[in-house]
Image (cartoon, rainbow, N blue to C red):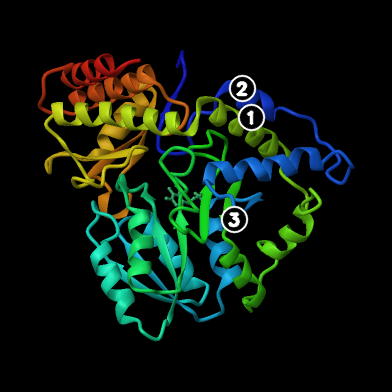
Amino acid sequence: MAGRNHLYIPGPTNVPNEILNAMHVNMEDHRSPVFPKLLTPLLQDLKKIFKTETGQAFIFPATGTAGWEVALTNTLNPGDKVLIYRFGQFSHLWAELAKRLGFDVEIHQEVWGKGIPLDRMEARLKEDTNHEIKAVLATHNETATGVTSDIGGVRKALSAANHPALLFVDGVSSIASLDFRMDEWGVDGAISGSQKGFMMPAGGAFLAFSQKALAAVETSTYPRCFLDLKDQMNTNKDGYTPYTPALPILYGLRKALDLLQEEGLENVYARHHRLAEGVRKAVAAWGLTTCAQPGFASDTVTAIIVPTDKDARDVISTAFSRYDISLGAGLSELAGKAFRIGHVGDMNDVSMLGAIAGVEMAMLDNGFDFKPGVGVAAAIEYYRSTAN
Ligand code: PLP
């Protein structure tokens, strides 16, 4: 098909040409005396995205899933209890990973469409007077349902309970696109990946740990090798890595950090909010609802529920085969019931209008009942009235 496939899945996202070009490099000697000139500033600048001055940033040639594992196996001991609220496929997968690694996982099943229930979390932490819970695992942005949780509120719940558990946050689909404040919110381990807000291909797990978490690394007896933070610390301090680095990922990250700093993080967050609002206006105009309940809507992804007599998979397949746009599928419980529009990364008004128009055509082709153009019109009005 002429033209190009338009990627509106919530990661991997579109890679800007500047980043693609920056990644197109020949290999270099990663033990040369000049290599630290690349790595050391990267690790420093990464901290600004996490908004941490006191923490330490890390880069693994891996993905977000490895980030989950790094956090748990470097700071905890085998069999330790961890607390997780599960309200979508990614919080589910993190809980499953923790179980498979042999941790004692206390799972609280929540409604898909809402986020972490702060009051109940606080009550549970207060009840844990012996401090058996060693870590709280919080999914900041549940990509499967398009739900954002209040991480500042999670820290308040821990403080109100005077609970010493480590706070680990999955920011794979939030960091570098949604407001994230590691130091202010007292996050002990923040986990992200290259293929969403960082606008890069997959293959980089970007993490940051607090001094409290790094102290826990010293006492953790969990066996680890490839994902060992100590090996990173021992080599990163001189500007090197414990094994061969994924050089294109490092060069891509350099450009991504420059682009994010150039736009300004607050502007990046505001852009994501505005683009998401336009999508939500279109959803309302179509007479549909989002999976996210009021107060939980994500600014990086919207999961749209289809009427019960429709199958969301048909919309996704028509959109792909007829209009060359890629949408996110409904995952697990939401399979067939929802499709997702990603609005994360290198997007602007017109890219979102492309997504909305393509979705609208695919829905009309599948017999959805609304007037052609209503979603696009609602988004256009919103984008025009809020344009700079
Ligand atoms: N956490 C969230 C919120 C995600 O959206 C994803 C992937 O989409 C992951 C974790 C897993 O990351 P990866 O696929 O990079 O391993």
Q: In the image, which disc is placed on residue 18? A: 2
Q: Which part of the image, by quadrant, shows the N terminus?
A: top left
Marks 1 and 3: CB-CB under 8 Å?
no
Is 6 located above or below residue 143 in the figure? above
Is 343 located above or below residue 239 in the figure? above
Q: In the image, which disc is placed on residue 255? A: 1
Q: Decide if ligand 1 comes within 8 Å of the CB at mark 2.
A: no
> Residue drawn 14% across and 26% down?
285
> Residue drawn 23% across and 46% down?
292
Residue depth check, mark 1 versus mark 3: number of the one nearer the observer: 3
Marks 1 and 2: CB-CB under 8 Å?
yes
Q: Mark 1 or 2 closer to N-term?
A: 2
Is 353 located above or below residue 212 in the figure? above
Residue of label 3 = 55
**What is the distance, in whole Å, between disc 2 and disc 3 at their CAs?**
29 Å
Expressed as whole percent of the image width and height from the top left, the position of residue 190 reads 51, 55
Q: Nearer the viewer, residue 20 or 358?
A: 20
Q: Residues within 10 Å of mark 3 (few under 14, many from 20)?
A: many
Q: Residues within 10 Å of mark 2 (few under 14, many from 20)?
A: few
Q: Nearer the viewer, residue 119 or 199?
A: 119
Expressed as whole percent of the image width and height from the top left, the position of residue 310 reads 16, 39
- Residue type highlighted by circle 1: Lys
Position of residue 356 in the picture relative to residue 177 (left or right): left
Residue at the outermost right position: 33
Expressed as whole percent of the image width and height from the top left, the position of residue 149 reads 32, 52
**What is the distance, in whole Å, between disc 1 and disc 2 at their CAs?**
7 Å
Residue depth check, mark 2 versus mark 3: number of the one nearer the observer: 3
